Amino acid sequence: MVIKEAKEKRIYVYMGCYAMVNGIAKLTYNGDKSIVYKKYRDLETGNTVTVNKNTVEAFEKENNIIFTIVDDYTQEEYEETYKVIKKTYENEMQNFGNKEEAYKLIKRFTPPK
């Protein structure tokens, strides 16, 4: 009998939706019909991933996603929010020593999808 090992979910912070406008990727709002891809940033490594709109649902299902609250749809605003979330996550990791518990706490302070 073969037992599959459960893949650990990564924690990503949502960094915005992008649409192509005159051949240039532009940050846009989530409900925009012209979205081409979404960006996410790994909370532990800081690596940014670009996910095609056709695979977003699968990506979000395979990973833990933290959706941010931003006042303005700008890259700078997303970056500042990411820094706050990362700092909070690192503090909670020190307190709990457990990645899942730190994630749950941060998730409570962020809006649902």
Image: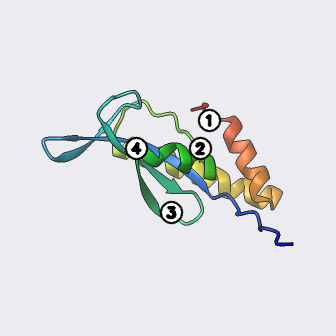
Instruction: Tell me what residue is drawn at x 29 percent, y 33 percent.
Output: 34
Q: Is residue 58 left or right of residue 108?
A: left
Q: Which amino acid does label 3 sit on?
A: Gly
Q: What residue is pinned by disc 4?
A: 53
Q: Which amino acid does label 4 sit on?
A: Lys
Circle nearer the N terminus (2, 3): 3
Q: In this view, does 81 lie to the left or right of 35?
A: right
Q: Which amino acid does label 2 sit on?
A: Ile
In the image shown, does 74 or 40 lie closer to the viewer?
40
Q: What element carries label 2?
A: strand
Circle nearer the N terminus (2, 4): 4
Q: Which of marks 2 and 4 is in front?
A: 4
Q: What residue is pinned by disc 3?
A: 46
Are the two marked residues, 2 and 1, in contact with CB atoms closer than 8 angstroms? yes
The percent position of residue 26, horizontal first and vertical second, equals 25, 42
Q: How far apart are the alpha carbons under marks 3 and 4?
A: 21 Å
Residue 108, picture quadrant: top right
Instruction: Tell me what residue is drawn at x 80 percent, y 56 percent.
Output: 95
Q: Nearer the viewer, mark 1 or mark 4?
A: 4
Q: What residue is pinned by disc 2?
A: 66
Residue 2 vertical placement versus 38 (above, below)? below
Residue 78 vertical placement versus 98 (above, below)? above
Circle nearer the N terminus (3, 4): 3
Q: Is mark 3 on a helix, strand or loop?
A: loop
Q: Is mark 1 on a helix, strand or loop?
A: loop
